[in-house]
Amino acid sequence: MKRVLVVDDEKLIVKGIKFSLEQDDMQVDCAYDGEEALNMAKQTEYDMVLLDIMLPKMTGLEVCQQIREFSNMPIIMLTAKGEDMDKILGLEYGADDYITKPFNILEVKARMKAIIRRNAKKEDHSEKVRKITVGDLALDCDSRRVVIAGKEINLTAKEFDVLELLVFNPNKVYSRENLLKTIWGSDYPGDVRTVDVHIRRLREKIENNPGEPKYIHTKWGVGYYFQG
């Protein structure tokens, strides 16, 4: 049974989502403000968190960011805001997906199942090499830790996914469209700017000089690749 945390200060929305998910045999916990949500996420490793952005006490973005400091549990942001830059901002904080209100509960369920399915596929490939070191960079897939010159680097879930894919496929050039489809899934509604944002943030975190990267390179007009 999948366990889901639904976070929204609008109790009717929470009630509706809870009822619908329980029809699919999911166990649903509810929170109505950011602090409550964060405390519950610290106590339970959820299979999915549906997290509204506009919350009392702490915003959904703050909750998402703090959850990412101790867990990679999947997070879908729920918000009435629909601008592209808001979507990118939400994903920068470590969210896995983003749905704008008003939404159809069937769409929410479809997005949830797609993310859970992708996570299950990652677990199925657990027999592959789980650790790799390239120059000063050490990547551990089991603990999802990245260390540069002995210093641990804090990456969001998607930043780690992008780096992992590039590191394990050195010198292979990935187009922005390919990265978007591989990491975020073919059903992800955002655009390739999301990829550019994550590459930029990765470089800021792992490169001594992001303007002259050592690890993540750009092949102009084609895409990105890793070279140690």
Image (cartoon, grey):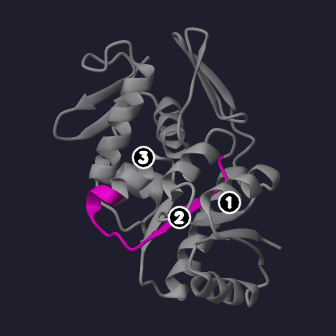
Q: Local crowd at mark 3 within 10 Å, few (<14), some, or many (≥20)?
A: many
Disc nearer the start of the sequence (2/3): 2
Q: Secondary structure at mark 3?
A: helix
Residue 130 or 8: which is nearer the viewer? 8
Give the side of residue 189 with respect to residue 157, left or right. left
Q: Is residue 105 above or below residue 195?
A: below
Q: Residue furthest front?
A: 57
Q: Which mark is residue 125?
A: none
Q: Amino acid at mark 2?
A: Leu
Q: Which residue is mark 3?
A: 92
Badge 2 is on which residue? 55
Mark 1 Cα shell of 10 Å, populated few (<14), some (14-19), many (≥20) = many
- What residue occupies the far left of the structure in this picture? 221
Q: Which residues are magenta?
A: 72-86
Residue 51 at what x, y percent from top left?
57, 65
Vertically, is 41 above or below 205?
Answer: below
| Residue type at the position of mark 3 | Glu
- Residue in the picture at 75% in, 86% down: 22
**Residue shown at 64% from the left, 47% from the top:** 67
The residue pinned by badge 1 equals 37
> Circle 2 — which element?
loop
Q: Are marks 2 and 3 in contact (CB under 8 Å)?
A: no
SS for dot 1: helix
Instruction: Please state which amino acid type lies under the numbered disc 1.
Output: Ala
Cβ–Cβ under 8 Å for marks 2 and 1: yes
